Image (spheres, rainbow, N blue to C red):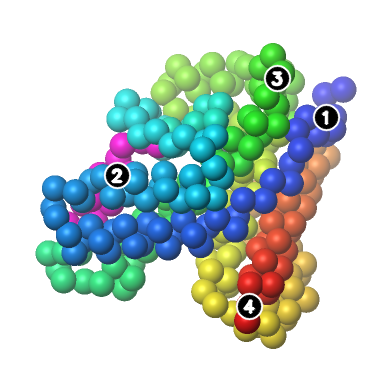
Amino acid sequence: MRHSIAPTITEAIGVSHLYVPLMTAFRDAVSDAIAGDEAELEDTIPAAIRQVVRRHLGDRIRVVFDPELKVDAIAVGDTIRLKDTIRQNYADGAVHLRTAGVDVGDSPRMVHLIRATATLVIHELVHIQQHLRQAGREKMEYRSYLGTADEFEHQMRRAAEVGGGTPESVRLYNASPQEIPALAHEAALAFVDKHGLAEPRSRYQLAQLHANLHNLLTAELYSEFNKPSNTAEYAVFKRFGRLLYQEVIRFIERAATQKD
Ligand SMILES: [Zn+2]
């Protein structure tokens, strides 16, 4: 059954609500760093990330900063490994802002970094939850809905050889049971930013968005992503769209119940 889409893992994960706490903690840490001692600048961001993860997810998940890591972030078991340059980017950004006397909250560069890092951490948290759900199994199953096991393995080997993704390896990898939910979370967060949902919204505004959500997301999906050209691609597209929809709904409902 080449195009079976039976899920191998529970897909609806729901960690996007950590987006705002993560961004707030990063922003506070950078503000403190700018105001504080230059020597402490580099350590404030990792400390903030660890603190937020511990507060919301407990001690089971560890965040490790690994200077040797070649990718931006990766989930290994119950550990998130983040590339050291994230820390360096923040430190550079903070130095830049301190020199310029700019408020962190007003700096597009820092806002971009804060969003990118929070999104990266959430992507990896989705994988960590997948690992935790699969704990006890022999090993994680890696495959793609868009190719056979052999094709997938071959493409992953090719990608490793060239030291990065090829267009085909990325296409297959992004259509894996692990990546679809993680990428749907990323898209949900982009939607949250685009519609200002991370900022306080009135109940009325949230209800309005809720009512229009299906149309908004459908338009977004068709403008942002490759149009499906066969049955297997359509199945991936639908699965991705469903997870994206669920995740944004969850975000909106949470925002609505946190009012007053
Ligand atoms: Zn991933």
Residue on which the image places disc 4: 259
Query: Measured along the vertical axis of the image, is residue 4 above or below residue 19?
Result: above
Q: Which residue is drawn at 36% across and 62% down?
A: 27
Residue on which the image places disc 2: 87
Q: Which of marks 3 and 2 is nearer the N terminus?
A: 2
Residue on which the image places disc 1: 3
Q: Earlier in the sequence, mark 1 or mark 3?
A: 1
Label 3 CB-ligand 1 distance < 8 A: no
Disc 3 + disc 2, Cβ < 8 Å:
no
Amino acid marked by disc 4: Lys
Q: Alpha-carbon neighbours of circle 3 within 10 Å: few (<14), some, or many (≥20)?
A: few
Please provide the residue range marked out in magenta.
Answer: 82-95
Is 228 within the magenta? no
Is 93 within the magenta? yes
Say what secondary structure mark 2 lies in. helix
- Location of residue 181 (image quadrant): top right
Of the pair 108 and 29, the residue shown nearer to us: 29
Say what secondary structure mark 3 lies in. loop
Q: Nearer the viewer, mark 1 or mark 4?
A: 4
Q: How far apart are marks 4 and 2 (CA)?
A: 34 Å
Q: Is 242 placed left or right of 129 in the picture? A: right
Q: Which residue is drawn at 52% across and 74% down?
A: 199
